Image (spheres, rainbow, N blue to C red):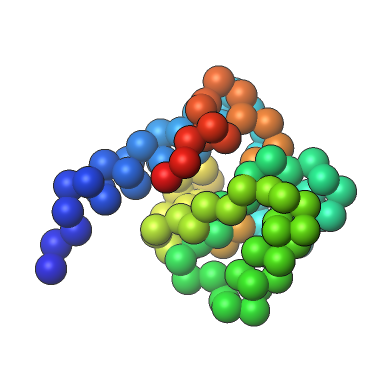
């Protein structure tokens, strides 16, 4: 079954918001440095790719819950998440430190 227009629009809006964050704000790509950002309290939001291993996913979610940080489960896999960030490599965890001009931190999708 093909994805509906609403889910496709949500993915496109998240991609555009993420692109704006990478251009005007500040974000950390990667699992290890994302965990550091969560522990130090610098992160404001965490995006997790859909094919992130379950143990890593639960660890990131647990630390985000302790730090009271918003978690967004990105609908695409790690390749799509890296591409949405404008990078040419895979990335399973993106930690947003500063939203910049984007409204990604205030959105509730």
**Residue at horizontal 68%, vertical 31%?**
98
Q: Is residue 90 left or right of residue 80?
A: right
**Residue at horizontal 86%, vertical 48%?**
40
Q: Is residue 84 visible?
A: yes
**Residue at horizontal 52%, vertical 26%?**
102
Q: Is residue 16 left or right of residue 103?
A: left
Front residue of 109 and 91: 109
Picture quadrant where residue 62 is located: bottom right
State which quarter of the image contains the C terminus.
top left
The image position of residue 7, as x and y in percent, is 26, 50
Front residue of 62 and 78: 62
Front residue of 27 and 42: 42
**Residue at horizontal 36%, vertical 37%?**
13
**In the displayed image of the protein, which residue is found farthest to the right?**
40
Q: Is residue 86 visible?
A: no
The image position of residue 53, as x and y in percent, is 57, 76
Q: Is residue 21 left or right of residue 7?
A: right
Picture quadrant where residue 9 is located: top left
The image position of residue 103, as x and y in percent, is 51, 27
State which quarter of the image contains the N terminus.
bottom left
Front residue of 7 and 29: 7
Q: In the displayed structure, would residue 90 be above or below residue 105?
A: below
């Amino acid at each position: 079954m093909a994805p509906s227009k609403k889910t496709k629009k949500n993915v496109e809006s998240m991609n555009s918001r993420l692109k704006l964050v990478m251009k005007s704000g500040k974000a950390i790509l990667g699992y290890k440095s994302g965990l550091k950002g969560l522990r130090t309290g610098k992160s404001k939001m965490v995006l997790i790719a859909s094919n992130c291993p379950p143990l890593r996913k639960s660890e990131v979610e647990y630390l985000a819950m302790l730090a009271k940080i918003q978690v967004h489960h990105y609908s695409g896999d790690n390749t799509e998440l890296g591409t949405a960030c404008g990078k040419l490599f895979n990335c399973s965890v993106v930690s947003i430190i500063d939203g910049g001009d984007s409204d990604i931190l205030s959105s509730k999708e």
